[in-house]
Image: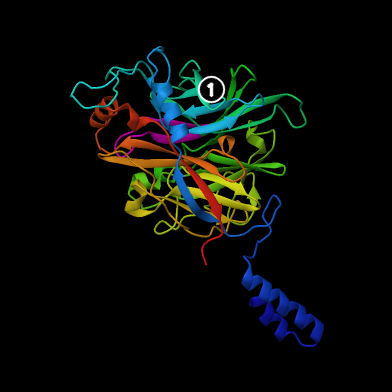
Amino acid sequence: MPDDRRARQRRGAGVGLLLTLALAAVLLTALPRDHRGEGGGTCTARTVRAWSPDAGLTDSFAAYGDDETRTDDWTGGDGTHSVRLPDGRVLWLFSDTYLGRVYAPPNPVGESYAWRDTAAPLVRNSAVVMRDGHPELTLPAPLFPDPAPNAWRWPVAAQVEPRSPGSAESVVRVLLWTRTAGPYPWIYGVPAATEVATLSLPDLRVESIVRVFGQELVQDPSRRVQFGTTSVVAGDWTYVFGGNDAQAAARPTSSAYVARVPVGRLGEPGAWEFWDGSAWTARAGPRPVLGDGRRTGVGSAFSVVRDGGTYVLFTMAAGSRGLTTVTSYWACSPTGPWHGPGRSFSPPLPPGQVAAYNPQAHPEVGDGDRLVLSYDVNWLDATATSAALNLSRNVSLYRPRFVTLRLGPPPP
């Protein structure tokens, strides 16, 4: 080890010092350098040891979307994120969302799928309230208004935190991605900025929206970073992860970035710090913590959880498997080094030209032994018209699906 060699080169070093350094070298060989997890707890290698479909949650959202007694609520959406509220309810946040009515099969072309009219309303975001494991209410949609013509907001990670540090009053802070319409290959919009919305409790009213990280000055849209795909609270800090859209520029993988904010201050732009590759800085110059552009990296949306002192990241796999396969990485700190990819798995997909994306962990609906992960499913087609037609013919395509995971050490 480097420390051990330097020790041997020093003249006059005592035998005791040499023995101490040798023992340290053995320990460093056996454990990652940062084996004490940032935020407390012992950090050990983690991977997916087992998984199974979670039919209960999948069917719960399907039943809610198919309920014909309501004509102005959620019937399907993607970008699935969740946060547990202080009164036990769970708030589910979605990006592009279909509203309206779902019709029983057969559909207009004779297939045995429930369907929606092709003129069904599509809004850029929505929020669904769940109680006792069942969705029960769609908030007026879109919950977050468009910031400008040809621009929109997609909600991502959310946290319940004090209105201000030390306050007894809690609010919900929702990270938002602002996107603008753009030419091909930006069929899902050009990244513009990261914002934070504050929602009051318990009525979930939008009080304010502030910009915390703008990216319009970055000339290459594929290198623009948007934060909030996932967030983790550890100690006094909220770690907010983000990514770029390198895959839109035909690069195999995107890169992951991380910022941190003191708990209770997500909505304060001046409180944000970014990892620049060697230190936290208030300057907006983040550097990747994961992604080599080839074998390792993330999709534009991924998820991170803490398992003891270990941080575990879930993302779609690199390369062609990124349309069907979820993989994971682990680290002892949000800044890495990240180890992996670990064991991968391919969750169930419906037949047809479909793709899985946006794996998101939901500790709010799991327990100590199991972790619930959602993934979104969409029709795989280069033309928006064809995709919209197929999503209308089969409403189950554009709804979250769930699996249950068990984490553990990698197999020997």
Q: Who is closer to the viewer here, 248 or 124?
A: 124
Q: Quadrant of the N terminus?
A: bottom right
Instruction: Inspect the magenta stretch and tell me whether residue 187 lies in it.
Output: yes
**What span is in magenta?**
176-193
The residue located at (55%, 26%) in the rendering is 91
The residue located at (42%, 33%) in the rendering is 400
Q: Is residue 233 above or below residue 128?
A: below
Q: Is residue 146 above or below residue 323?
A: above
Q: Which percent across, then down, holds residue 375?
A: 43, 39
Q: Amino acid at mark 1?
A: Val
Question: Can residue 368 be spotted in the picture?
Answer: yes
The residue located at (79%, 80%) in the rendering is 17
Q: Which percent across, then down, holds residue 3?
A: 68, 76
User: Callout 1: 10 Å neighbours few (<14), some, many (20+)?
Assistant: many
Q: Who is closer to the viewer here, 190 or 283?
A: 190
Question: Can residue 123 be spotted in the picture?
Answer: no
The residue located at (41%, 13%) in the rendering is 72
Q: Is residue 65 above or below residue 82?
A: above
Left or right: 142 as drawn, with respect to 364: left
Q: Who is closer to the viewer here, 346 or 294?
A: 346
Instruction: Inspect the magenta stretch and tell me whether residue 119 lies in it.
Output: no
Scheme by which the image is coloured = rainbow
**Dot 1: element:** strand
Q: Which percent across, then down, holds residue 158?
A: 57, 32
Left or right: 66 as drawn, with respect to 113: right
Q: Is residue 136 above or below residue 317?
A: above
Residue occupying the far left of the picture: 109
Question: Mark 1 — residue?
Answer: 129
Q: Which percent across, then down, holds residue 284?
A: 57, 43
- Residue 408's quadrant in the figure? bottom right
